[in-house]
Amino acid sequence: MKKTLAVLAGLLCLMACERPRIEAPKAPSSPIPQYATFTDGLLPDITPKGWIETFLERQRSGITGHPEALSYPYNSCLWNGDITRNTESYGSDWWRYEQTAYYTDGLLKLGYLLKDSTLIEKGEAGIRYTLDNADEDGRLPHTNFTWARMWPMAVFFRAIQAYYYAHPGEPIPEALAKNFSLYSDEELSVWRNIVNIEGMLWTYDHGADSTLLGRAERLWNAGEYGDLTPEVCLADKFPIIHGVTFNEELKLPVMLYARTGDRKYLDAALKAYNTLNEQHMLPDGVNTSAERLFPNDFINSSHETCDIADHTWTLGYFLETTGDAVWADRLEKAVFNALPGAVTKDFKTLQYFSSVNQVIATGDSNHNEFFFGSTWMAYRPTHQTECCAGAVHRVMPNYASRMWMRGRSGAVVAALYGPSEITVALPSGRPCTISENTSYPFSEEIEFTLAMEKKEAFPLVLRIPGWCKDASLTVNGKPAGVELTPGTFVTLERAFRNGDKVRLSLPMEIVREHVPMGGSTFSRGPLLYAYPVPEDIEVDDKVYDNMAGKVPENPDFKCLSITPDGPWNYAVTEGEPVWKSTGAEGYPLDRDCVPGKISVPVKKIEWELWKGRFTPSVPKEPKAVSEETQWIDLVPYGATELRVSVFPELF
């Protein structure tokens, strides 16, 4: 009997100790360029969780999954054939392919992240068509337009890149190399065509054409084309330049540095970014651009939703190349604030222009010089110019695809934080799944749990944000024994085993900051906070003259007119802001579910709509209408549509 019990106990022990069976990752890491620090390429192996998964699911049930609500050209075949013009005079021939390339990039990555076969098939169909319909010389379709003939391909490349990570081994680099070889330097240099350097360098990394690096250098160094030339990068003040074009081209010198190690490229990229940051950056983490760059003290500075997508994509290249944590901090700030601040929380409408202060959003409330008084600041599925309605789909899938990266010596890098899961191949070739359990940035705690077959040593790299002064790190409840310097990456190099738990605590403090446009902002960790202006929301069925007759083609998607339905004319006054935990659960960007608020002391001032229908500028010398001090609650910026996040100061 004792022997039988002993055998049974042994079997139970073996069952309890059985290692998990983990499917090996399908996608290899993209090669790390010689002078870079990290690389992405893990998209198929990342599974978003928690609030990020909910965000992406709302994309799927919102306009990403219902392109008919966006109207033309998203209601077309996309890149799976030829898109007919909807009018004889509508835009240039390349225009509709640029917009649908934005959309396909976001759609396909969303499909991979949610493991959604319908989205994947729709996105991949256009890529297969593009690759299968090259002409006899190898020229890919939709690249034979006048003037900006190769710009749509520069955008579509990003979808092709994602497809390759899901289908490694297909001859995609070779197809791209052949296509690039068929265009002259002059053709590749015109305007944004030069952004094809991004695809050229990726193709070079994958060994398809060793001449592409030299050609990319020659194109950028010529300084004759494009907008962000070497001379402009090094200037102390930018000329009039389109903001989206700036963000698209800003990645090129840093990418060239990653492959050559030539410091002049990195110096140019850093100088250009620093000028942008000092003169054009808004508190939500994205530069002014309506449509050109404006100084960040310009009245009611705004940015395009396209800028959110392009700025954050470029920041990812800065991060991968330099390994400097500051780029991850800035990327998080833009994605966590500017992105949700430009869409309704059901992801059924977006703004073309969004602003850090916007107390009205209607069909005629655009306060920017560009198309002044038009629909461009309204929350709508359809917009006069559709590029932002395409680019918005890219932002969160791009963020999720770069949350995890690979470093040298087999390092696994938690580059950008948020609830997720990743399966990677360890140096031995065995798989390891790391679960990141957190509601960051809405909480301070992040716990990583490892599932692996056998004990194995590998470097796990974590980031200590620059805003965090007192981070702590434990492994299985014991101090990790590594220095945690704000604004750095730290490496845990040890033998990990199944079930290990790594816990990172990132205490957040309220920060009050005076900004160039005049006024105070309040932030906590990577989140900007704003006063949610009381709203009166109505459906706007009017067909505006500037919309060329376009309306949402799905009755479940409405254009909105949102006007203020309560006071918002507050100036902050003396007194320390107070953190208030709400204890609320649910999706943290829904107004009723925000887990915490910042309470600030204010006084009402003389401040009203400009001309009765526009958001007014921040008064430099506000006049109080009451001496009574009130306390108002600020919520995360991304939980608002109408808002005040830059407050006049009254002391």
Image (cartoon, rainbow, N blue to C red):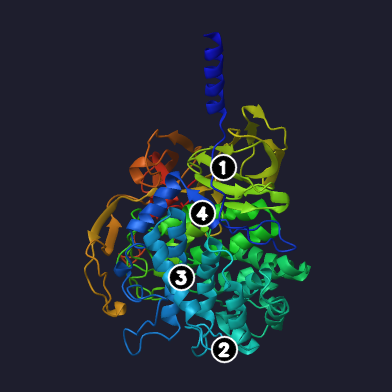
Nearer the observer: mark 4 or 2; the answer is: 2
What whole-number distance in Å separates the C-alpha atoms at marks 4 and 1?
Answer: 15 Å
| Residue type of the residue flagged with mark 1 | Ile
Task: From the top left corner, tell me how far across and down residue 286 is, in percent.
Answer: 52, 61
The reply to whether residue 485 is visible in this rendering is: no
Q: Please name the residue that numbered disc 3 is placed on.
A: 102
Determine which residue is flagged by label 4: 400
Instruction: Judge left or right: residue 180 versus residue 291.
Output: right
Q: What residue does disc 1 label?
A: 434
Label 3, label 4: how many angstroms apart (C-alpha)? 17 Å
| Mark 2–mark 1 distance (CA, rounded to whole Å) | 45 Å
Which amino acid lies under the numbered mark 3 shown in the image of this protein? Answer: Tyr
Which kind of residue does numbered mark 4 sit on?
Ala
Q: What x and y, as percent, mark residue 543?
A: 24, 74
- Does label 4 or label 1 sit earlier along the sequence? 4
- Dot 1 or dot 3: first in sequence order is 3
Residue 300: image quadrant is: bottom left
Query: What secondary structure is marked by label 1?
Result: strand
Front-lying residue, 460 or 380: 460
Nearer to us of marks 4 and 1 is 1
Q: Secondary structure under badge 4?
A: helix
Q: Secondary structure at mark 3?
A: helix
Q: Kindly report the distance in space between the C-alpha atoms of the residues bearing marks 1 and 3.
A: 31 Å
